[in-house]
């Protein structure tokens, strides 16, 4: 019997012996007997487990699994050993991670989903549970073609983490595939209610509005969500642009104008109101061909921006096109009365004199 064989036999007789384990480990690697090394430590793990020495058994199984995985490239054998580790210690993170990767590489996606579900049963950490549900959703949808099961998993993730925005796109995609967009809308509504940042709420409201304007076909709710988005975000050009894109696709600028009229009346901060009124004027003039209402929107805006030269020039241009000198004159007179800029007041008076 060779010296290495004697070491193997000694470890088999006494699996608790660390000195025997070290001799087997060093001798096997020196002689290139890697398969025999993996088998010896797998057997050692089994014997230690029978004796109730779980911690040491886990270490033996992990060592054997690493030899199978990294040296022998026997992924199936490594996966079986990591499963044995989890039988002994369900929360062993290294084994969970390694087994997940191996099952994926082996194409054993149903087993992978089962692994994640078992972990979900044990975990009490909401962050980990959210991630696991998202993993399950991805595997079910992308690898197993189970969009319904994937939707349920993603929905569970959204309920666990009502502030997690990365869930939304996946949930919308799965909701569209499964015909469950109404449930997606409820989930996004929950996300919106849990957001403290008004700009994030605005983005979520916009997505809800798009859903209700489109596939859910609920115009009243859509307009309500569009209104909420504009109110929440401070009237930023980005949100206004996105809102307009949705209405433009459906040629519903009359409804957009009505929406902006309502929102502008609610404004208490002048720069935001001016921005909304100017956008409203642009829609009336260029999308709806109503220069008269465009002019009225700009004259409302000038009450909050009497020093805005471009705004007054726009009023002059529209008033001239409509031959409405009275409205233009009233706007310039108000600007002169309210402005504190002496040079602009002089400029407005010159302009006003040309109208006479």
Image: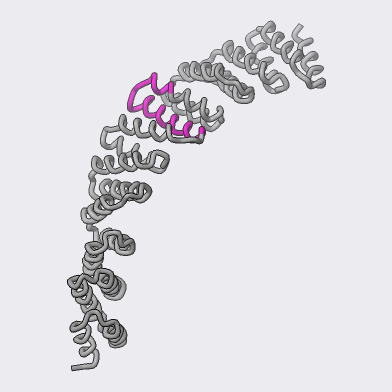
User: Would residue 35 be seen by someone viewing this image from the given angle?
Assistant: no
Q: Is residue 279 left or right of residue 63?
A: right
Against 154, is 69 above or below? below
Q: Residue drawn 22% across and 76% down?
A: 44
Q: Where is residue 309 in the image (x, y as percent from the top left)?
A: 72, 22
Q: Is residue 11 above or below residue 226?
A: below
Q: Is the magenta stretch mostly helix, strand or loop?
A: helix
At which x and y percent is residue 332? 72, 13
Quadrant showing the N terminus = bottom left
- Stretch in magenta: 198-224
Indicate left or right for 88 with 325 as reference. left
Q: Which of 87 and 155 is in front in this view?
A: 87
Task: State the residue lying farthest toward the front.
Answer: 52
Image point 19% across, 75% down: which residue? 47
- Magenta stretch: includes residue 121: no
- Residue 105 percent location from the top left of the image: 28, 61
The part of the image, by quadrant, that contains residue 165 is top left
Q: In this view, does 293 lie above or below 109?
A: above
The structure residue drawn at horizontal position 82% and vertical position 20%, both measured from the top left corner, is: 342
What is the number of callouts on the image? 0
Q: Quadrant of the C terminus?
A: top right
Asked whether residue 276 is in view, the answer is yes
Residue 319: % across, % down: 66, 11
Where, by quadrant of the figure, is residue 151 drawn? Answer: top left
């Amino acid at each position: 019997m060779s010296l290495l064989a004697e070491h193997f036999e000694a470890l088999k007789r006494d699996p608790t012996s660390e000195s025997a384990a070290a001799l087997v480990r060093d001798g096997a690697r020196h002689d290139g007997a890697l398969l025999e090394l993996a088998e010896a430590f797998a057997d050692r793990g089994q014997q230690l487990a029978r004796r109730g020495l779980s911690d040491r058994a886990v270490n033996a199984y992990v060592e054997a699994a690493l030899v199978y995985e990294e040296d022998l490239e026997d992924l199936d054998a490594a996966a079986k050993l990591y499963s044995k580790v989890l039988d002994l210690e369900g929360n062993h993170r290294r084994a969970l991670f390694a087994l997940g990767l191996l099952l994926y590489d082996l194409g054993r996606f149903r087993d992978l989903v089962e692994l994640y579900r078992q972990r979900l049963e044990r975990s009490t950490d909401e962050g980990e549970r959210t991630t696991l549900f998202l993993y399950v959703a991805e595997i079910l949808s992308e690898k197993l073609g189970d969009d319904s099961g994937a939707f349920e998993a993603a929905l569970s993730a959204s309920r666990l983490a009502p502030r997690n925005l990365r869930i939304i796109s996946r949930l919308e995609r799965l909701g569209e595939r499964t015909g469950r967009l109404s449930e997606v809308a409820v989930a996004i509504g929950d996300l919106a209610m849990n957001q403290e940042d008004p700009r994030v709420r605005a983005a979520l409201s916009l997505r809800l509005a798009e859903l209700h304007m489109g596939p859910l076909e609920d115009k009243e709710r859509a307009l309500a969500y569009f209104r909420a988005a504009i109110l929440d975000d401070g009237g930023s050009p980005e949100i206004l642009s996105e809102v307009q894109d949705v209405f433009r696709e459906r040629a519903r600028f009359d409804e957009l104008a009505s929406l902006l009229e309502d929102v502008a009346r609610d404004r208490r901060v002048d720069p935001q109101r001016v921005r909304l009124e100017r956008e409203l004027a642009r829609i009336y003039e260029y999308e709806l061909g109503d220069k008269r209402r465009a002019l009225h929107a700009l004259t409302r805006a000038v009450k909050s921006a009497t020093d805005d030269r471009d705004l007054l020039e726009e009023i002059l241009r529209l008033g001239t096109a409509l031959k409405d000198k009275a409205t233009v004159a009233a706007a310039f007179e108000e600007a002169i009365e309210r402005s504190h800029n002496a040079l602009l007041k002089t400029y407005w008076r010159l302009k006003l004199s040309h109208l006479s």
